[in-house]
Amino acid sequence: RIVLYPVNLIFGILSSLVERFYDLYVSKAHHGSIPNKIWSFLSRTVLKSQLWSYFDNETDFGRQLSGFDPNHKFQPGDDGYEGGLKGLVSVLKDKLGLKRVYCWHALHGYWRGVDPELGKSLGVNVTNVHPKASSHLLSIEPQLEWDTVSLFGVGLITDPLDLAVFYANLHAPLVEAGIDGVKVDVQSGVSAVGGGVGGGPHLARIYTEAMEKSVSQHFTTKDGAANCINCMCHSTENLYRHKITSIARASDDFYPRRPESHTVHIVNVAYNSLFMGEICLPDWDMFHSKHESAELHAAARAIGGCPVYVSDAPGSHDAALLKRLVLPDGSVLRAKLPGRPTRDCLFNDVGRDANSVLKIWNQNTHGGVVGAFHVQGVAWNFDTHENEVLGTSYPDLIASVKPHDVESLRGTNGPFVGFRHRTGSIEILPNGHFPMNDQISHRGWEIFTIVPLQVTNDGISWAPIGLADMLNTGGAILQTGNIEQPIQNGEGTKSKRAYVESRGPGLFVSYAKPSPDRILIEDGNNLLNLSFLYDEGSGKLSFMLPNENSPTGSH
């Protein structure tokens, strides 16, 4: 004890000095700088065993896939689930009503690939490769020079026939447990480690082909769609290989404990979708509904045309916010296209210039939608390799939203009707260039629903807008018709009729001039009268749609 005490003290002091050196000089150093070179040398020599201990004990990044069966967390015992993975999935579906359950895995098995011993048990050759990141990658992310893959190698399968065996063994137990799909991560990590084993593009091709073939065999819906989310796949070697799977993450992760990350997350997904949306369906990642930035994220997901999902801890939910995204049957009012920046902010630096509002447009079945976001104050710093907070207090900005910000409305001259989600106000827009101006606070947002206005020769105007309380209000409308010619009504006089088919339930809003005589809703073979509210000044017409009960799930 007398001997060990000073040794441990000295070791602790040295560890503290090393950590301080890394934090002060290495973490933000450029590739090729003196601190960078010193740390690169130390990580491969005197610090290698300590780094292995850290990665092995504190993270999952040093681990390799060592088996295909569910691990101890899904086995009967003190720290496992009594019913196993299959039992857990059954509870989730049968008792809690989940329709689908997905599992995560890396494209090459786990963060550091496959354990060679597992390969031997399958009769599959696993090569432990020590890759060297390219100078371009290191200029963006210098830490790749001493990550677990560079220091300790990655277990790769380089034969296409062996990959088929690997994926069959990986996916079959999941199917047996009732799993419906997979999220396949670390895809660009595979294409980055191809040196000496055929090159990155070659590895990406054989891995993606084998993965997609297995997904199509194990995780497809009745209509043939593949239940797979691709992730960490922005390398073109990966994106250009997807032939069967169609969903791909468009950004870095949602970081609930990094307040500086939330506005820049919205910026990244919108601008990345400009490119990725031509190849796949961009996935804008999950978020927490009970979070200081929850509304900002929810508004973006509502108009992003992307899947909508949250990673809330059980019992920690903002039900009121979720109800503005999800209908009672669990479906979302997803817009038709990937959300993209509008033309007038394509080349604006919406996080740095202190003047510009980010505007994201999308198309609904009827009309379009534009989201305006004040996301100034955070931008990526290429010198420090992290998001830089440029300021925490910014004045309100004016968002100017026009009908022709929605690309699919550019063929329509007008007039249009605009609806603001947060205020519920309606405005007539005589042409595609007529603006709706709105004052947006820092980290604030507004969603504008824009629909064409029908006007008859005798002065009747009509524009269905959608469900007012849903973030993507116009996404509720499934079909609408023109104002029809006069028909005989119940009182023996003639009146014109407008038709709309909408999801529900909820408060439906539209524009009408003059006020309608009545609102009728189909109930089987019957037509029922609905009570309605009408504001003569604005032309706003609103009424409550009841729960859906038709075979088509709409009204």
Image (tube, rainbow, N blue to C red):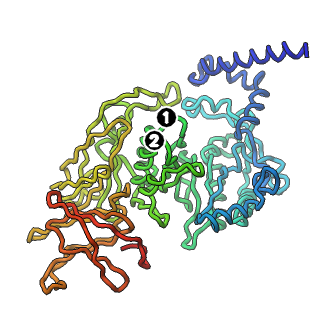
Are there few (<14), some (14-19), or many (20+) residues within 10 Å of tag 2? some
Residue under the image location 64 percent in, 21 percent down: 22
Q: Nearer the viewer, residue 50 or 280?
A: 50
Residue type, label 1: Pro
Q: Name the spot of residue 114 as percent of width and height, x first.
A: 75, 48
Are there few (<14), some (14-19), or many (20+) residues within 10 Å of tag 1? few
- Location of residue 40 with respect to 268 vertically, above or below: above
Residue 213 visible to the viewer: no
Residue under the image location 84 percent in, 48 percent down: 117
Give left or right: position of 538 versus 236.
left
* Residue that mark 2 sits on: 293
Give left or right: position of 469 versus 223.
left
Residue 221 visible to the viewer: yes
Q: Nearer the viewer, residue 75 or 209?
A: 75
The secondary structure type at the circle numbered 2 is loop
* Residue that mark 1 sits on: 259
The secondary structure type at the circle numbered 1 is loop
Residue under the image location 69 percent in, 50 percent down: 108
Q: Name the spot of residue 275 as percent of width and height, x first.
A: 43, 48
Quarter of the picture containing the N terminus is top right
Residue type, label 2: Ser
Assess whether mark 1 and mark 2 are in contact (beta carbons under 8 angstroms).
Answer: yes
Q: Nearer the viewer, residue 493 or 151?
A: 493
- How many marks do you count on the picture? 2
